[in-house]
Image: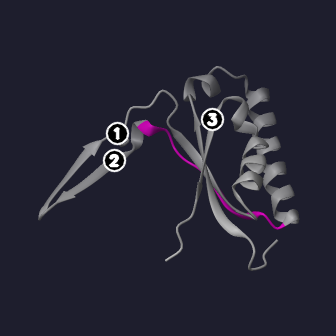
């Protein structure tokens, strides 16, 4: 899968953190286990590049530069119903394959996965 015919896609994982907080410790551990297992399966298939979970949006900071003025505000860029919770960078032959991979991400059952091709310079 690492041939010249594949492209990079980012799968942005959005979900409501309150749903995670409502889970029992056993349910959270099971979700973590299934997420880790999915990452390992993607590694074996050659689709995996990297995956990371993010801390809560409550600790986010947004930096904006306009001209020479830099401003920093608390919080994410937007207050989304399902904020960004993590990402998986993958290789896929095309968008259809990337969407199929995204559908397998365990957190897709709690929120949504935004799939975007990586712009290569």
What colouring style does the render use? Answer: one colour
Check the image and report above or below for 60 versus 83.
Answer: below
Distance from label 1 to label 2 (Cα)?
5 Å
Residue 75 location in percent, x, y?
34, 39
Instruction: Write down the quadrant of residue 51 in the picture.
Output: bottom right
Which quarter of the image is occupied by the N terminus?
bottom right
Nearest to N terminus: mark 3 or mark 1:
1
Check the image and report above or below for 84 versus 39.
Answer: above
Q: Are the residues tagged 1 and 2 within 8 Å (C-beta)? A: yes
In the drawing, what numbered circle is on residue 75? 1
Distance from label 3 to label 1 (Cα)?
20 Å
Q: Residue 48 lies in magenta, yes or no? A: yes
Instruction: Please report the bounds of the magenta region as a residue range.
Output: 46-57
Which structural element holds mark 2? Answer: strand
Nearest to N terminus: mark 2 or mark 3:
2
**Residue beneath label 2, please?**
61
Nearest to N terminus: mark 1 or mark 2:
2
Residue 86 location in percent, x, y?
58, 47
**Residue beneath label 3, please?**
112
Q: Residues within 10 Å of mark 3 (few under 14, many from 20)?
A: many
Q: Residue 14 lies in magenta, yes or no? A: no
User: At 56% from the left edge and 64% from the top edge, which residue is drawn?
Assistant: 118
Q: Residues within 10 Å of mark 1 (few under 14, many from 20)?
A: some
């Amino acid at each position: 899968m690492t041939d010249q015919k594949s492209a990079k896609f980012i799968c942005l994982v959005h979900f409501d953190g309150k749903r995670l907080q409502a889970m029992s410790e056993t349910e959270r551990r099971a979700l973590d286990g299934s997420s880790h297992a999915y990452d390992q399966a993607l590694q074996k298939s050659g689709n995996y590049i990297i995956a990371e979970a993010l801390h809560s949006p409550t600790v986010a900071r947004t930096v904006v530069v306009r001209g020479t003025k830099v401003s920093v505000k608390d919080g994410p860029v937007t207050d989304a119903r399902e904020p960004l919770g993590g990402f998986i960078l993958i290789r896929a032959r095309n968008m259809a394959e990337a969407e199929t991979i995204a559908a397998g991400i365990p957190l897709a059952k709690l929120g949504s996965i935004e799939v975007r091709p990586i712009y290569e310079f």
